[in-house]
């Protein structure tokens, strides 16, 4: 699979598994996570990748705190309380 496609899949995984409202990531943290799985990325290409994910339907949120921007996945298919309710009902 092409490196660009793998990078997008890794970004999707990072946002769905590693972020939420209370656990956002900085751009440098995301770059480090991608580097850990042998995907290189720079700041400018990640901005484009985030926009592509938004166009695909991912709710990528950028929040400015002091002088740092944090990113996380906003809306999800299921929120944690909904998942707990589903698990308990089985």
Image (cartoon, rainbow, N blue to C red):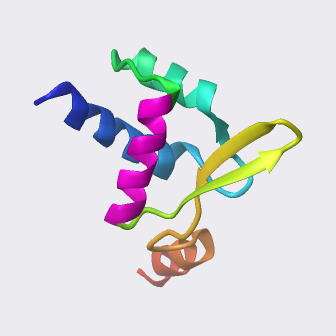
- Name the foreground residue: 63 vs 17: 63
Report the residue at 59% width, 48% height from top: 19
Say whether residue 88 is left or right of residue 29. Answer: left
> Which picture quadrant has residue 81?
bottom right
Image coords of residue 12 (percent x, y): 38, 47
Q: Is 5 drawn above or below residue 86 in the view shown?
A: above
Report the residue at 47% width, 84% height from top: 89
Q: Assign the magenta stretch its main secondary structure.
A: helix
Say whether residue 22 is left or right of residue 89. Answer: right
Quarter of the image with the C terminus is bottom left
Image coords of residue 7 (percent x, y): 31, 32
> Which picture quadrant has residue 77?
bottom left
Report the residue at 89% width, 40% height from top: 66
Question: Count of labels shown?
Answer: 0
Residue found farthest to the left: 1
Image coords of residue 25 (percent x, y): 65, 38
Image coords of residue 79 (percent x, y): 56, 72
- Name the foreground residue: 80 vs 60: 60
Residue found farthest to the bottom: 89
Q: Is 50 covered by the magenta stretch?
A: yes
Q: Is 57 covered by the magenta stretch?
A: no
Magenta part of the chain? 44-56
Residue found farthest to the front: 44
Q: Is 67 drawn above or below residue 64 in the view shown?
A: above
């Amino acid at each position: 699979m092409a490196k660009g496609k793998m990078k997008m899949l890794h970004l999707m995984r990072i946002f769905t598994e590693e972020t939420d409202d209370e656990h956002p990531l900085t751009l440098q943290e995301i770059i480090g996570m991608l580097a850990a799985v042998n995907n290189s990325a720079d700041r400018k290409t990640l901005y484009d990748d985030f926009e592509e994910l938004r166009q695909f339907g991912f709710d990528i949120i950028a929040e400015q705190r002091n002088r740092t921007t944090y990113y996380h996945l906003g809306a999800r298919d299921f929120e944690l309380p909904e998942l707990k309710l589903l698990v308990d009902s089985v």
